[in-house]
Amino acid sequence: MEAFFRTHAYLVEHTDLPVRRALMDEIDWRQPLIGIKGTRGVGKTSFLLQYAKENFDVRTRKCLYINMNNFYFQGRGLADFAREFRQGGGEVLLIDQVFKQPDWSKELRRCHDENPGLRIVFTGSSVMRLKEENPELNGLVQSYNLRGFSFREFLNLKTGNDFHAYTLNDILQHHEEIAAEILEKVNPLNFFQSYLHHGFYPFFLEHRNFSENLLKTMNMMLEVDILLIKQIELKYLSKLKKLFYLLAVERPSAPNVSQLALDIETSRATVMNYIKYLSDARLINMIYHPGDAFPKKPARIMMHNSSLMYAIYPNRMEVIDVYETFFQNALWAYHDVRMGDRFSSFLVDGRRFRICIEEPRRQHGDVYYAAADMQQGHGVVIPLWLFGFLY
C-alpha cells in the first residue's frame, strides 16, 4: 500500500491541467460508484488526478489513485485491495482502466457491497457498455462521458480567457450578443483552423509529433479497446482496420455494406457489428434518418472529429466535410443529430441546420445556417465556431 500512496503523491504533484474540464463540475461526486468513460487520448487519467489534487491533501491518505496496468492486481483482487484501503481510513478510490482487471464489474460490485461509505470513481473505454452488459452494476453506477476538448476549451487554453459554455437555445436566440462579447477579447477565427487540425485531443500539448501520436492512439483503440473489450480474435484485426480505412477515405455517405463485406471478406452482419464497434470507440459517428437506429444502416458515416480526418487523409479532404464533421461532433453528445433534408445538412432535435463556408445568398424557410468564415452572424445565420461553445 505504501508504494501506491507514493505513486499517487508523485502523480498528483506533477498534474496540472492547463484548462479545467467542464465535466468536473457536472459530476455528482457524492455518488458511491461513478464511471467515467471516454475515448483513448481525451485525458481521463489527468482528469482523475486533477480531481484528487483539487479535493484532497495527499498527506491525509483519504484518496488514492491506482491503475489496473499494475501487475500487482494480477495476483490480488481489486475488492481485497479496496477493503484494505478502506480499513486504513480511505474514502475515495480512483481506479484507472478498470477493464484491465479480470471480472472487473463483479469486483466493483464487491468493492461497493463490502465497503460501506467508500466512494469509487473508475475510468473505462467508451466501448464499454456499463449497464447493458454488466447487470451487476445496473442501478448502482452513475456514468459520465469525458469528451475531447471543445473549441471553447481550446480557445481558453490558447488565449488565457475563461469563456463559459452556452446551451443550444442560448446560441440560436442570442448568438449576435454572445459573439460580440467574445470578439471583444479575441477573434476565434484566428484559432479555429488549428482546433480543427489538432485541438480535440489534449495530447497536442505534448512535445511529440501530433499526427504520429494520434495514429498510435487510433491503433490502440482498435487493438485494445475494441478487440479486448468486445473479445474479438486477433486474426480479425486486419479486417477491422481495413474497414475503418475504407470508411475514412470515403466522403461522408451511406455505407455500401455489401461492397464493404466483399472488400474485407466477411458477412454483412459482421460489417454492421464492426461499424457499431467503431462508433462506440468514437472513431466514427453514425448519422441516421429520423426514426431510424442501429441495426439499420446509417444514412451517413462521418469521422468522429476533424482531427481524425487530418491524421488519416489530409490531402483528400473537402473543406465542407471538415466543417460538417466539426458541427456534428460538437452536438451529438447532448442532442439528437439526424440526417438533413434537401435544404439542410442535419436535423438537430428536429431543427434544420445547413453548414456552409460563407453566408448563403438564399435562405430557405426555417433553416439555420452555420457559416464557417463568419466572425459574427445575424438572424438565422450563425458563425460555425460558436457551436464549439456548447460544452
Image (cartoon, rainbow, N blue to C red):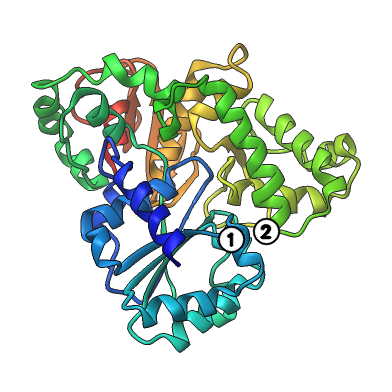
Q: Residues within 10 Å of mark 2 (few under 14, many from 20)?
A: some
In the displayed structure, 78 sits above or below 232; it is: below
Q: Nearer the viewer, residue 200 or 271?
A: 200
Residue 292 position, x and y percent, is 59, 56
- Please determine whether, in this image, residue 83 is positioned above or below residue 337: below
* Residue 390 x/y as whole percent: 29, 42
Regarding mark 1 in the picture, which secondary structure is present there? loop
Left or right relative to 7: residue 223: right
Which residue in the structure is indicated by mark 1?
128
Label 2 is placed on what type of residue? Ile
Write the residue at 34% across / 15% down: 358
Q: Quadrant of residue 30?
A: bottom left
**Residue ID at (39%, 43%):** 331
In this view, 247 is above or below 29: above
From the viewer's side, name the closer residue of 89 and 199: 89
Whether residue 23 is visible here, answered yes or no, is yes
Residue 43 in the figure: left or right of residue 377: right
Residue 62 versus residue 103: which sits nearer the camera?
62
Residue 381 visible from this viewpoint: no
Helix, strand or loop under label 2? helix
> Residue at (66%, 66%) from the top-left corner?
74
Vertical comparison of 335 with 181: above or below: below
Going by the numbered disc 1, the residue's amino acid type is Met
Q: Which residue is mark 2?
A: 229
For the C terminus, the image quarter is top left
Q: Foreground residue, 235 or 48?
A: 48
Q: In the picture, residue 254 is in which quadrant?
A: top right
**In the displayed structure image, the side of residue 62 where residue 240 appears, left or right:** right
Q: Do the residues bearing badges 2 and 1 touch, measured as CB atoms within 8 Å?
A: yes
